[in-house]
Image: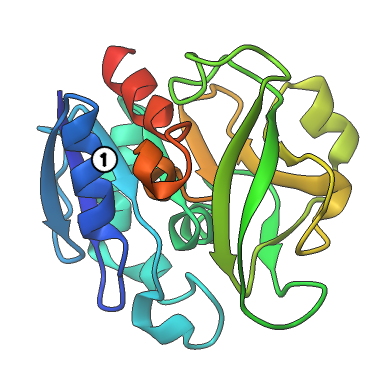
């Protein structure tokens, strides 16, 4: 499975995602922000980092680059798209997932391991988990607090992917830290599965995100 790993100026998790995709059995390929034809890809991952230095707000400048049109065409072809951390902010910014990821309740950069509950396994990325399964992955962000005024709709349409279990480190609405579009094929998560892809890192739970996508 050929998976595009999108690169922006300021991306810093692209190589980690590439490595995790290789571990999961995929064929990752770096894609620069100038490219707008991604239809030869089977899926895309937008990794974390600080695209364009988070100037204006996280994801705002990346959202108007040519590669976004390529990603939208891929979504129209019903191919999986995963946004991690800054990638989640970008997907929110361009309207491919509902709600926003905004400044943390305690407005500073937060980096820590978190316990998470998988709220749906209908996405390609969570299909390897059981519903309500507890997993462990780290977060690392300053603008990760999720908000959506249409919480009831989000719940009714089974679009909540991950919730913090126990501590809510950024003040997200209802502890939500991962959402998907109505199809489940576009998924935005603030925790970093690539940083939890090998047991030596502290958890290998995140590897299932990439295995699930590849086996989809």
* Image coloring type: rainbow
Q: In this view, does 16 lie to the left or right of 208?
A: left
Rendered location of residue 156, percent (x, y): 82, 21
The C terminus sits in image quarter: top left
Whether 44 is drawn above or below 161: the answer is below
Q: Is residue 149 visible?
A: no
In this view, which residue lies farthest toward the front? Answer: 200
The N terminus sits in image quarter: top left
Rendered location of residue 4, percent (x, y): 19, 43
Q: Is residue 205 left or right of residue 176?
A: left
Whether 60 is drawn above or below 146: the answer is below
Q: Quadrant of residue 7?
A: bottom left
Rendered location of residue 160, percent (x, y): 71, 32
Q: Is residue 8 left or right of residue 177?
A: left
Q: Is residue 118 left or right of residue 11?
A: right
Q: What residue lies at 68% left-to-right and 14% top-to-bottom?
A: 131
Residue corresponding to mark 1? 20
Circle 1 sits in a helix, a strand or a loop, which is it? helix
């Amino acid at each position: 499975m050929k998976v595009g790993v999108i690169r922006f100026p300021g991306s810093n998790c692209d190589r980690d995602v590439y490595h995790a995709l290789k571990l999961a059995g995929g064929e990752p390929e770096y894609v620069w922000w100038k490219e707008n034809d991604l239809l030869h890809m089977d899926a895309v991952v937008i990794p974390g980092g600080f695209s364009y230095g988070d100037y204006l707000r996280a994801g705002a400048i990346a959202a108007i680059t040519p590669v976004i049109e390529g990603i939208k065409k891929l979504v129209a072809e019903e191919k999986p798209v995963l946004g991690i951390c800054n990638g989640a902010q970008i997907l929110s910014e361009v309207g491919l997932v509902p709600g926003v990821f905004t400044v943390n309740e305690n407005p500073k950069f937060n980096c820590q391991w978190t316990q998470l509950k998988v709220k749906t396994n209908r996405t390609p990325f969570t299909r390897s988990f059981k519903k309500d399964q507890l997993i462990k992955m780290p977060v690392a962000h300053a603008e990760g607090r999720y908000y959506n005024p249409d919480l009831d709709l989000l719940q009714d349409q089974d679009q909540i992917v991950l919730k913090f279990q126990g501590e809510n480190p950024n003040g997200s609405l209802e502890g939500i830290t991962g959402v998907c579009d109505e199809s489940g094929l576009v998924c935005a998560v603030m925790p970093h599965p690539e940083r939890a892809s090998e047991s030596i890192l502290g958890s290998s739970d995140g590897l299932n995100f990439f295995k699930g996508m590849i086996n989809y």
